[in-house]
Amino acid sequence: METGKSVARTRIDSEHPLPPSTHPGKELRFHLLGPVHVRVDGAVRDIGSPQAQAFLAVLLLQPGRTATLAELVHGIWGDEPPDTAVAAVRTHAWKWRRFLETSGVGRDALLSRGDGYRLTLTGPLTDVEEVEGLSASAAEARTRGHLEEADTLLKVALGRWYGEPLNRVPGDFAARQRARLTELSTVLSEERCDIRLALGRASFAVPDLMVLAAAHPLRQRAHRLLMQALHDTGRQHEALAVFDRIRRGLAEEHGIDPEPELVRMHQRILAGEGLAEAPSRGTTAEAAPWPPRAQPGWPVPHQLPHPVENFVGNEQAFSSVVEALLPPRRTGPAIVAVTGVPGSGKSSLAVRAAHQVQPAFPGGVLHADLTDEGERTAPSAVLRGFLVSLGLPRAALPEGLSDLSALFRSMTDGCRLLIVLDDAHDAAQVRPLLPGSPRCAVLVTGTRLFPGLPATRRVRLGPVSVEESLEILASVMGQERVREERAAASELARMCEGLPLAVHAVGDWLAIRPELSLETLVRRIHDEPGHLLSRCETVRTCFEKNVRQLDPELARAWTRLSWSPGCLTAASASRALGVPHAHAEVLLERLADASMLERRAHRGYVFSALLRQFAHLEHPLPVTAPLPPLVA
């Protein structure tokens, strides 16, 4: 017989499906860690009504034993079953036998025993059994001191959740199991963070622990681990603030003091003692998680794109965004604006942060791109998509923008919902999309500074360092190639000006050309400045999209100014554009606000080398003839 450890190893090493049942002709896998569904030989099959799912859950989550008729009735309907409950249970049993037969497994897989029923299928059938096996293996690995193995096992286990367990399955039994499985997810998350602290990876544990602490404001282990992680990353004052917050919460809610281990950690931080070498081992679970709000008969929206796997750099900005989305108390929605020059990784950071905080928003995550091929997406179109995603039929939607916005605020009132608005043009486009509930949070990205947006936090992305750029190149091209030509790789990173998009693009281009040396590419770029951009289509597309967001006058001014060498001032821009001094000053300010120029304190404005090269490559102007005036 396979142990939980061997099953877990099969899942990690080969990603094969679960072992087959006693009927080797077909393979069943029941998914319970989200909306319930079943796969037969990999194909999803319809499994009937919520009550039929509740019947199945009672059998699957009590493997190897017979569920009596009384248990099934109580599990589906609780203390007040209908008069037809017994007949309904018999009908569900008949339908499941038919399902098993048509799936090629056989009717005898569901047997009658006394007045109840028992599944005869063997082997791990559900994702719940798989997670329990992985959890047991992780605990064993940690006991043996194999922390890397335990961390990997827990990462795989936590990846099996894809929503609220047994989502919309009725009955007392499903409710108890839902609470158990949600608690299991939280405990495993805490355990993995504890292991990461023991491995010296506190900076990577902080965002997850912020999510846990915000979702469970009285859970002492989560707060203890967060305090340790903050202390280990040099953020002692924040660690002390965490203690003050939970101490007040415990006193106000229950009239109790923090547990002794939490108090001891507080004292050690005050004393300046090291904590990284002494990870906590407790598994206390004080507070049951609050249940997510679900729209009956409609899936909770989870619209985030897949995050960038090899995200590197801007870790401080990332932590700031995560923290700002999860304040303990507020009177209005958290509105976090992430800005930066084109290609600085705003969208990647936002998606990664949203994935981190997603568990704290059980009402769902809505995502919209506010720019379509450089054109501004109408807020009314975005609102219609959001309202349909929340369960409203299109025929019920009003026409006007103000009515759509009001309906959206009503739909999201009291709901823990995260809204990600990517590549916004201005505050006017964003304001109608803002909810009113303090339980919601909004994450906005764009190149502009969004004056007029009621942001609770603004985060400006800077360039990543050369070392971080080298990490990106290594993740795309391979460590060995970067190590062998480190000097050329460093020069290439500097040429990309710390823009993650440019570094990724160059790395991708080189990855499929293993015969080309980095030194050769660097030499070609020095000889021909436009050579780099000509190989990076994604960067050119990004830059072009941002140029198209400028109004025509501003776009013409930006193109013409790209031919002016050195630092730009209002006086030099006035001469280059043929406009009055005051007007030139306004144009420079607007271009800087749109992140198409960089401010240099009181010394004026400059073009980034890549943007200047792009302007010359894609928007050329004759440089031998004088420029005509910008305005007639």
Image: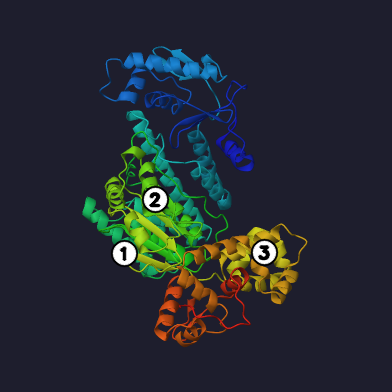
- The foreground one among 360 and 230 is 360
Image marks 1 and 2: residues in contact by CB distance under 8 Å: no
For the point 58% across and 67% down, which residue is it?
Answer: 468
Q: Amino acid at mark 3?
A: Arg
Q: Earlier in the sequence, mark 1 or mark 2?
A: 2
Q: Which mark is residue 454?
A: 1
Q: Amino acid at mark 2?
A: Val
Question: Which-is-in-front pick, marks 3 and 1?
Answer: 3
Question: In the drawing, does residue 390 fall left or right of residue 37?
Answer: left
Residue 76 visible in the current orientation:
yes
Indicate whether 400 appears above or below 625: above
Mark pair 1, 2: CA separation:
20 Å
**Residue 382 numbered tag:** 2
Q: Dot 2 surroundings within 10 Å: few (below 14), some, or many (20 or more)?
A: some
Q: Secondary structure at mark 1?
A: loop
Q: CA distance from mark 3 to mark 1?
A: 40 Å
Q: Nearer the viewer, residue 287 or 369?
A: 369
Tag 3 and tag 2, C-beta contact below 8 Å: no
Binning the other alpha carbons within 10 Å of mark 1 as few (below 14), some (14 to 19) or many (20 upward) gives some
Residue 472 in picture, x, y percent from top left: 61, 63
Which numbered disc covers residue 535?
A: 3
Hey, which residue is sitting farthest front in the picture? 632
In the picture, the disc for residue 5 is none
